[in-house]
């Protein structure tokens, strides 16, 4: 199924009582939507990166729980709540780093616990999932404005991975700021790391920027320091998968590399993430679980073996950037400059 | 033609009066040698990266000049020397950054100028080219020992691109040090950047290390800072394409990124290059011409378009690492610690 592109990219839709996901593994070559009927399918889609990006994973999980509740209620209205636990556990085990997944599961779990015995849960849970989805888009637009306000003169920026509409409910976190700042005339050019091994930058970020008519130039990660050396960028702007209570940021592997280089070159570092990405139960980044993905993602390119046989590969999906290297964390509740535990707590108490 | 692998990888051979090059574009999938009969073919092979790596380019160029002289002599013993000039110019225009190319052309040109009128130039030029080739291997072995002596306890190291036997006359520069230090028991594990866009690390360095039974783990460039953060490497060891008189080093794009990160993490940075890579006529790195290669190398992967249509790409083939970020430049004439103009000049006068 190929859909006409609207002015806003939609990675996640609820349609005809199904969760419909844009298959991000085959973008931009093919625009194909998968229609999911069960929570198991949703768990698998998150594992396989049909959908990726911390907020998008959280939203998809919320819809997946709607599917789970519907299935379990159909099977047994008397025991659906117990039977659902297995679905929630499997969903929680799909990917370890993005905390939005656990946040969404917890939020849905609290609603499930409060539902009266004997009530079909589907409607209430669907409303909750759709509210999570709407709230995320609204948060992104707020962050877009707050982040764009930090960019007060025309410049180029560098982004990494994809923290756009495809990674969220819509509009995007880092790309939301870039959209807003571009509309304001201050982001004039976007440099995007291609983001090996999965090429989210080349495949997804470039695709979103082209659709928005924002000039975008790809580069290999190795070239980013040389780009900064030539003073071609004023800001590095990225999303996050989990932010610890002290402001340490887990994000796509390569982010920490950019942060070290940004500091070295006097380029500012902005992290854009909704408060659903902040994990106040983790004191600092050292406790954030980092997903190790299959070495095949590095050893093969485009499904073809590229590396010498006999070599192995190290493929952490994320790294942790210490708060000390971050100039601003932009949330929907406000901007945290030079983040630390005290400032993070102040913003989170403000919710 | 598939050759059995000997204990030393040979990228360049003179065989049956032809220049025989191992086609590095298709390694490690296919081991195929191209047999070249003309200087034009040699120029094209350098442009197309059949052969790459600064010393290997220089050696190939020297052999290419043998082929040119043979052809021009056959065509016209009276005017071969004038007719050859065009070949030398085309050869010099093949790739701009590696200075070994220009060094080899100059060296061969001086021999050409001294040849008596009426003498068939082939024998003398072949001897000169073979001497350049032998000298390079010998320099690599000397550098291997000198560099390995700097690694005085068992550790892991990180390398970038391929500065191995494939990039040189044999043995390698950075990988020569790694070979020697591995033999001494001090390099226990090699981490190798895959080195986008051409994947020299995944395809060539990994291949060389596997053949030597040196444990090698590939990573994407973006992961290198995270690797250093986890203190998994003691040294970054790389080659060079051109070193300026003050010790600034042009090398494969991504090297500067590693140097910034190495300094940030207290990892030592070693550059290994023969004095043929040092360009004393260039005061500092800002004057080194940096080759910009086709954006298709970034936009396509494995010959297939991967990036979104409408995006462009920035694809500098090299970057420049300031001398201040380098702990040691290892040459066959000695090690230059914390390089600067005075120390560089002292080593070069020592030749």
Image (spheres, coloured by chain):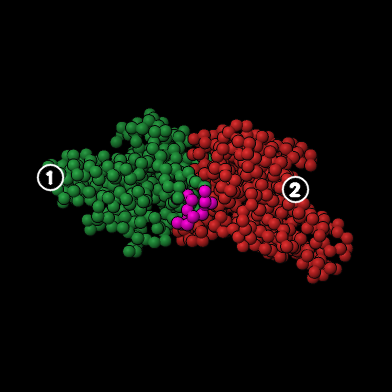
Chain colours: A red, B green
The reply to whether discs 2 and 1 touch (Cβ–Cβ < 8 Å) is: no
Q: Magenta segment: does it hold B309?
A: yes
Provide the residue span drawn in magenta: B297-310
Q: Quadrant of residue A128?
A: bottom right
Is B301 a magenta residue? yes
Query: Which residue is outermost to the bottom?
Result: A75
Quarter of the image that includes the C terminus of chain A: top right
- Residue at image point 44% right, 48% down: B161
A143 w.r.t. B207: above or below: above
Q: Any mark on residue B78, and which?
A: 1
Q: Position of residue A279 (x, y in %)?
A: 72, 46
User: Where on the picture, by quarter, is residue B116?
Assistant: top left
Element at label 1 = loop
Q: Position of residue B52 (x, y in %)?
A: 37, 49
The percent coordinates of residue A179 (x first, y second) are 63, 42
Q: Label 2: which residue?
A: A135
The answer as to whether the residues below labels 2 and 1 share one chain is: no
Cα separation between marks 2 and 1:
84 Å
From this viewpoint, which residue is outermost toward the top?
B342
Q: Residue at x 52, y 42 (%)?
A: A224
- Position of B287 relative to A108 (above/below): above
Q: Residues within 10 Å of mark 1 (few under 14, many from 20)?
A: some
- Furthest toward the left, the residue is B118
Horizontal side of residue B193 vs B288, given as left or right: right
User: Would you say residue A329 is visible in this rendering?
Assistant: no
């Amino acid at each position: 199924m190929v859909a006409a592109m609207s002015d806003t990219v939609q990675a996640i839709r609820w349609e005809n009582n199904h969760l419909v996901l844009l298959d991000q593994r085959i973008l931009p070559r093919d625009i194909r939507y998968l229609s999911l009927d069960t929570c198991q399918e949703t768990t698998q889609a998150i594992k396989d990166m049909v959908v990726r990006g911390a907020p998008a994973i959280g939203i998809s999980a919320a819809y997946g729980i709607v599917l789970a509740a519907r299935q379990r209620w159909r099977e047994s209205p008397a025991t659906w709540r117990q039977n659902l636990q297995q679905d929630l556990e499997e969903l929680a085990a799909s990917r370890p780093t993005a905390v939005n997944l656990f946040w969404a599961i917890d939020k849905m779990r609290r609603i499930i616990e409060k539902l009266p015995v004997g009530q079909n849960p589907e409607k209430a849970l669907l409303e909750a999932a759709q509210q999570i989805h709407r709230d995320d888009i609204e948060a992104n637009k707020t962050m877009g404005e707050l982040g764009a306000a930090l960019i007060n003169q025309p410049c180029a920026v560098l982004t990494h991975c994809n923290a756009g509409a495809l990674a969220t409910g819509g509009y995007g976190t880092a790309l939301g700021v870039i959209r807003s700042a571009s509309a304001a005339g201050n982001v004039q050019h976007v440099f995007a790391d291609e983001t090996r091994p999965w090429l989210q930058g080349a495949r997804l970020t470039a695709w979103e920027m082209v659709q928005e008519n924002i000039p975008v130039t790809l580069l290999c990660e190795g070239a980013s320091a040389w780009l900064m050396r030539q003073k071609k960028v004023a800001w590095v702007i990225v999303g996050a998968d989990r932010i610890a209570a002290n402001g340490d940021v887990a994000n796509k592997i390569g982010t920490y590399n950019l942060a070290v280089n940004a500091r070295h070159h006097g380029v500012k570092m902005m992290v854009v993430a909704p408060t659903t990405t902040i994990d106040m139960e983790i004191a600092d980044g050292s406790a954030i679980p980092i997903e190790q993905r299959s070495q095949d993602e590095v050893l093969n390119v485009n499904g073809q073996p590229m590396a010498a046989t006999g070599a192995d590969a190290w493929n952490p999906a994320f790294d942790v950037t210490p708060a000390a290297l971050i100039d601003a964390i932009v949330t929907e509740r406000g901007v945290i400059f030079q983040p630390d535990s005290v400032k993070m707590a102040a913003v989170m108490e403000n919710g």
